Image (cartoon, rainbow, N blue to C red):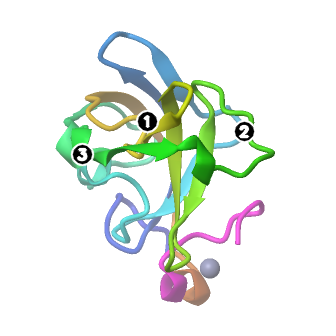
Amino acid sequence: MQPEKVGKDVVVSLQYKLWLDDGELVEETLADEPLMYLHGHDNIIPGLERALEGMRVGETKKVVVEPKDAYGEYDPEDVEEVSRAALPPELKPEIGMVLTIVDERGRSFDAVLTDMDEDSITLDFNHPMAGERLTFEVTITGLRAPSAEELAHGHVHGPHRH
Ligand code: ZN
């Protein structure tokens, strides 16, 4: 059966635009490539997921999400200085570049290089949208039931995804 409203275990397709508080448009779905996700499985930021609950196909809504319900507050402790001697020799550091750091347990983290001098570089491990209040305009374009496999995995198997 076709679900009527956005709710737990429903596959939701939506179009959205995303603005930051300064008015900058930072993300926008393409007309033929809506975002598709399985509702109720932490696949999107919690503030947006809550706001979509109960929406129907064709409905449009403006949603404002505070940082704590989006990518978290900016944490100044999440910034580290790294000695240049610890860097791979082939790396040419540049401000603004994104580096993937792997820790001793094999987990990887993205960091933005925000500063550097002769001896060291500064890496910011905060999410690029940490501390930002996000304004979305969303339109629900489709709802369907998940396959048994999608439900077991907790995510959607679209044409371009696993
Ligand atoms: Zn899967």
Say whether mark 3 is within 8 Å of ligand 1: no
Helix, strand or loop at mark 2: loop
| Labels 3 and 2: the sequence-earlier one | 2
Magenta-highlighted residues: 151-162
Q: Amino acid at mark 2?
A: Asp
Q: Which residue is disc 2 drawn over?
A: 32
Circle 3 packing at 10 Å, graded few (<14), some (14-19), many (20+), is: few
Find the distance from the CA under tag 2 to the CA under tag 1.
Answer: 27 Å
Q: Which residue is disc 3 drawn over?
A: 77
Find the distance from the CA under tag 3 to the CA under tag 2.
Answer: 41 Å
Return the residue found at the far right.
90
Q: Which residue is rendered at x = 74% and y = 34% of the image?
A: 92
Q: Quadrant of the C terminus?
A: bottom right
Q: Which quadrant of the figure has residue 8?
A: bottom left
Q: Amino acid at mark 3?
A: Glu
Q: Do the numbered discs 2 and 1 sit on residues whose CB atoms are within 8 Å?
A: no
On the rendered structure, is 19 left or right of 37?
left
Foreground residue among 84 and 25:
84
Q: Which residue is disc 1 drawn over?
A: 128
Q: Main secondary structure of the magenta part?
A: loop
x then y, percent, for residue 22: 33, 10
| Labels 3 and 1: the sequence-earlier one | 3
Q: Quadrant of ligand 1?
A: bottom right
Up/down of 11 relative to 30, above or below: below
